[in-house]
Image (tube, grey):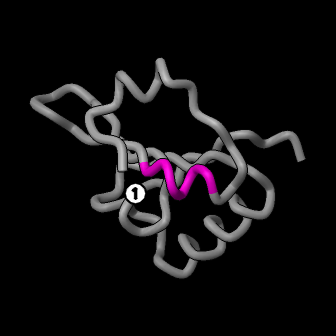
């Protein structure tokens, strides 16, 4: 009940992805993953390895579906915002 963020590993089975994303939307939980194309497949924050350093991409539409808000300061640090 107190979960605010969930990390979904890239090797999570596809059936589990759908379940966790549904739970996240209903429970207003932020989703983060290093899976390829995560933010294009319903995720909110995608971690991306760029030259040995992790950067992140944000799908603001997916975030808004959960009624969450992300600080403009955090969005300025993102590699991309969709």
Closest to the observer, 14 or 67: 67
User: From this viewpoint, which residue is outermost toward the top?
Assistant: 73
Range drawn in magenta: 59-64
Give the percent coordinates (x, y) of residue 41.
41, 69
Image-based side of 55 in relation to 19, left or right:
left
Task: Tell me which residue sits at (30%, 61%) in the image.
Answer: 37
Horizontal relation, residue 2 to residue 77: left or right: right
Principal SS element in the magenta part?
helix
Relative to 78, is 36 above or below?
below
Please indicate whether residue 49 sits to the left or right of residue 26 in the image.
left
For this orientation, the residue located farthest to the right is 1
Q: Is residue 76 magenta?
A: no
Residue at the limit of the structure toward the bottom, as seen here: 15
Give residue 79's position: percent from left, percent from top.
Answer: 26, 34
Location of residue 10 (image quadrant): bottom left
Q: Does residue 49 sit above or below 33 in this rendering? A: above
Dot 1: within a 10 Å radius of its alpha carbon, few (fewer than 14), some, or many (20 or more) residues? many
Taking the spot 21% from the left edge, 38% from the top edge, the residue there is: 49
- Name the residue carrying label 1: 39
Secondary structure found at label 1: helix
**Residue 38 screen position, x and y as percent:** 38, 59
Between 60 and 7, the residue placed more toward the observer is: 60
Count of numbered labels shown in the rendering: 1
Task: Locate residue 69, reporting x and y percent.
Answer: 64, 37
């Amino acid at each position: 009940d107190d979960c605010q963020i969930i990390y979904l590993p890239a090797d999570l089975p596809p059936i589990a992805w759908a379940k966790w994303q549904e739970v996240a939307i209903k429970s207003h939980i932020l989703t983060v993953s290093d899976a390829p194309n995560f933010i294009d497949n319903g995720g909110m924050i995608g971690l991306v390895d760029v030259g040995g350093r992790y950067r992140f991409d944000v799908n603001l539409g997916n975030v808004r579906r959960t009624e969450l808000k992300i600080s403009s300061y955090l969005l300025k640090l993102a590699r991309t915002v969709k």
